[in-house]
Amino acid sequence: MPTPHDQYVRVRGAREHNLRGVDVDVPRDALAVFTGVSGSGKSSLAFGTVYAEAQRRYFESVAPYARRLIHQVGAPKVAEISGLPPAVSLQQRRAAPTSRSSVGTLTNLSNSLRMLFSRAGDYPPGAERLDSDAFSPNTAAGACPECHGLGRVHRTTEELLVPDPSLSVREGAIAAWPGAWQGKNLRDILAALGVDVDLPWRELPAERREWILFTDEQPVVTVHPVRDADRIQRPYQGTYMSARRYVLKTFAESKSPALRAKAERFLTSAPCPLCGGGRLRPEALAVTVAGRTIAELAALPLTELAGLPDGATEAARVLTGDLRSRIAPIVELGLGYLSLNRSTPTLSTGELQRLRLATQLRSGLFGVVYVLDEPSAGLHPADTEALLTVLRRLRDAGNSLFVVEHHMDVVRAADWVVDVGPLAGEHGGRVLHSGPVEGLAQVPGSATARFL
């Protein structure tokens, strides 16, 4: 049984996925690496068992009404885990992609930069000082009214919406319309509005074509569908939506990647004419720091942004110093080439995980287990030592690190190694070694030992 000061996370009878009733003790306040061939069961032990159980225990402490709002995972297949502190997972996986998520929002560096512009920026003569929200493209106070904070506008043309003007509406001239019932519905509404849906598109009056494709009106009309051979369709009230409105709505709101991709085929993208791609209202883009707007600074590589001068006021010096201290661990992890406005969907999973790791250095958390999934993935060999330095700093702050890793430099630097194998799938799932890395060389059948 664990003592109040148990220094080990003790796992008994773990059977998640291919694990074969694994019993293992892993020290706390240490850098412990879980290694083995791909599919051996190391992730099932670290993430599927240890982290999953920590997450389950946390959810049990949450009020029942709040628990309903949280996506929960099932209990792992394990007899017992003792000595387990709260856990934080840094996995190689993405959240739902969004064009508004960026390096700046992920790391909270955007908040620091906005505060710098709000409190210490150079304002035009007579301009009122702006709140920090006015420098965010993700708020109503800051977003450019033309592009809604995206920096680009999407437009469409008759040529894109109607690629073959020799076809009639009934024959599918408006290629941007949806198929099946919804497209037939829009066609029937047009017919009810008095449009000749059997006339070739090019023969329709220009004013009528313009209205069909681009109107913002949404008239409601009674539709009398043609009777099908096998059923009678009743009249109904139909609301018309122009082709442009349908495409823009689908592109902006659809949760279906396929529908969004189809809508995008009918759109052209260009920098916003109002903000020039800066994503903000003109009054925010008129404020500068070191002679540059916030949009210009957000486009700089982090290594350059870290060289921002202190400024003349105490507020500027304090805020600039805070910004530099937040950038430092990101640059240390080999990500200094990124910019704050870099969209997160364009980042690799390794880049995302190292960004999250860098933010943890500022969190002030201690006494937790960080469970990481190959933090060296995509990292240049020259930056491995910097990664290890960051991991050790988290450990020395009073945390435990359980790292699933293949990189031998990380394995050699570990305080403790859990080697799982010997092979993958049904031929794995056993702990071959749990102890200091020096003892791994004596383990027969260990694939990891051959590469030390």
Image (cartoon, rainbow, N blue to C red):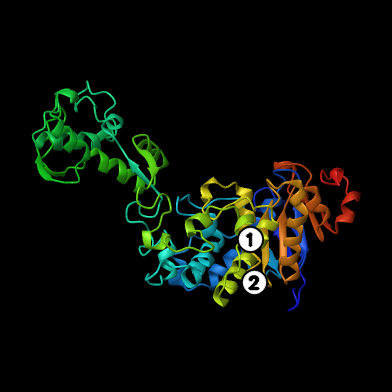
The amino acid type found where label 1 is placed reads Gly
204 above or below 283? above
Residue appearing at x 70%, y 57% in the figure? 332
Q: Quadrant of the N terminus?
A: bottom right
- Specify whether 92 is left or right of 442: left
- At label 1, counting other C-alpha atoms closer than 10 Å, the crowd grade (few under 14, some 14-19, many 20 or more) is few
| 99 or 331, nearer to the observer | 331
- Specify whether 397 is left or right of 168: right
Secondary structure beneath dot 2 equals loop
**What number is the disc on residue 403?**
none
Label pair 1/2, CB-CB below 8 angstroms = no
Q: Is residue 263 visible?
A: yes
Secondary structure beneath dot 1 equals loop
396 above or below 173? below
Q: Which residue is mark 2?
A: 365
Residue appearing at x 89%, y 55% in the figure? 439
Residue appearing at x 41%, y 61% in the figure? 286
Find the residue positioned furthest to the top. 166
- Specify whether 17 is left or right of 202: right
**What number is the disc on residue 307?**
1
The amino acid type found where label 2 is placed reads Leu
- Whole-percent x, y for residue 131 in the image: 42, 71
| 228 or 151, nearer to the observer | 151
